[in-house]
Image (cartoon, helix red, strand yellow):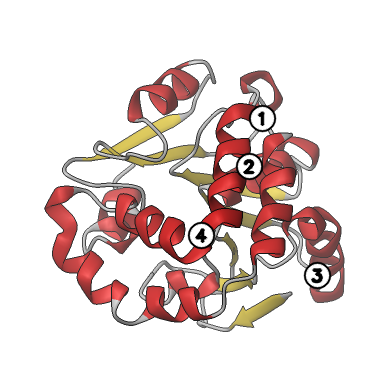
C-alpha cells in the first residue's frame, strides 16, 4: 500500500494521487524529501494504513502532498493529527464533489469505461499542455487504460462523495498550501481560491495556462518553495 523511496533527505513526504491515477504519476516530481508513495488502490484505508506506517518507521512528523482525490485524504488526516503533520500541500483540490456529479461519472464508467477515462485524462490538461498530454497518453495513461477496474474506481467514487474539505477543520494545520492550475477543468480555480481565503494562514499558488496536474510542470518545485 505504501512504498518508501529513500532520497537521503531526512524528512518524509507522503504522496497521495488522484482518482483513476496511481503513484506513478509522481515519477517526475523532484522535491527535497524522502517519499512515502501511497498506491491509491484502497483510499478508504488511507488513514489507518498511514498511521501504521508512521508508527512502524518511528516518524515524529510527516508532510502531506495530496492531489485531487488525494487532497481530501491529506486534509482529513491533517485535521485529525495536526501535531504529527508538519506541512500540507493540497493540489487540484475542491471543497467537495456533488452527489449528482459522482452519480454521473459512475454511469459513464459502467457504460464505457475506456471511452470515459480517455476523455477524463485529456481534460486533466489545458490546451497549452498538449505536448505533455500526448507524451503521457502514449505511455503512462495507456498503461492505466489497460488495467481499468470499474469496480475499484466506482468504490473510490463512493468514498469521494462523502468527503468535504471544511475550512475550520484545517485552522490548526501547519504550513498549508493550495496549488492549482488556472485552467483546471476538473476543479475550478475560483472554488479553491474561495476555500483558501477562508483558512487563516493558507497560501495559494496558481499556475497560469495549467490544468489539473500542475506538478508536471518543470518549474513546479521552484514555485512551491518560493513561499
Front of the two marks 3 and 4 = 4
Asked if marks 1 and 2 touch (Cβ < 8 Å), the reply is: yes
Q: CA distance from mark 3 to mark 4?
A: 37 Å
Q: Crowdedness of circle 3 by 10 Å Cα count: few (<14), some, many (20+)? A: some
Q: Quadrant of residue 158?
A: top right
Tag 4 secondary structure? helix
The residue at 68%/36% (across/down) is 161
Q: Is 119 or 191 nearer to us in this picture?
A: 119
Give percent across and percent down for residue 220.
28, 57
Number of residues whose C-alpha sits closer than 10 Å to that of mark 4, classed few (under 14), some (14–19) or many (20 or more): few
Q: Residue furthest front?
A: 111
Q: CA distance from mark 2 to mark 3?
A: 19 Å
Residue with the mark numbered 3: 53
Q: Which residue is mark 2?
A: 72
Please give the label number shown on residue 164. Answer: 1
Q: Position of residue 47 (x, y in %)?
A: 80, 54
Mark 1 and mark 4: span between their CA atoms?
Answer: 28 Å
Q: Earlier in the sequence, mark 1 or mark 4?
A: 4
Q: Decide which of tag 2 and tag 3 comes sooner along the chain.
A: 3
Coordinates of residue 127 in the picture (x, y in percent): 15, 49
Tag 1: Cα neighbours inside 10 Å, few (<14), some, or many (≥20)?
Answer: some
Amino acid at each position: 500500500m505504501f512504498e518508501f523511496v529513500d532520497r537521503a533527505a531526512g524528512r518524509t513526504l507522503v504522496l497521495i494521487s488522484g482518482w483513476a491515477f496511481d503513484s506513478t504519476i509522481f515519477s517526475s516530481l523532484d522535491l527535497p524529501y524522502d517519499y512515502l508513495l501511497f498506491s491509491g488502490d484502497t483510499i478508504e484505508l488511507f488513514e489507518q494504513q498511514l498511521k501504521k506506517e508512521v508508527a512502524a518507521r518511528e516518524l515524529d512528523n510527516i508532510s502531506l502532498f495530496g492531489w485531487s482525490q488525494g487532497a481530501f485524504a491529506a486534509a482529513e488526516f491533517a485535521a485529525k493529527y495536526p501535531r504529527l503533520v508538519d506541512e500540507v500541500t493540497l493540489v487540484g483540490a475542491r471543497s467537495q464533489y456533488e452527489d449528482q456529479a459522482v452519480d454521473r461519472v459512475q454511469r459513464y464508467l459502467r457504460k464505457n469505461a475506456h471511452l470515459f477515462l480517455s476523455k477524463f485524462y485529456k481534460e486533466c490538461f489545458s490546451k497549452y499542455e498538449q505536448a505533455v498530454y500526448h507524451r503521457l497518453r502514449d505511455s503512462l495513461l495507456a498503461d492505466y487504460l489497460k488495467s481499468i477496474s470499474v469496480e475499484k474506481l466506482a468504490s473510490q467514487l463512493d468514498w469521494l462523495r462523502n468527503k468535504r474539505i471544511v475550512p475550520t477543520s484545517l485552522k490548526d494545520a501547519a504550513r498549508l498550501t493550495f496549488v492549482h492550475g488556472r485552467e483546471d477543468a476538473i476543479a475550478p480555480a475560483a472554488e479553491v481560491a474561495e476555500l483558501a481565503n477562508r483558512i487563516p494562514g493558507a497560501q495559494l499558488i496558481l499556475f497560469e495556462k495549467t490544468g489539473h496536474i500542475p506538478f508536471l510542470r518543470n518549474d513546479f518545485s521552484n514555485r512551491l518553495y518560493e513561499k
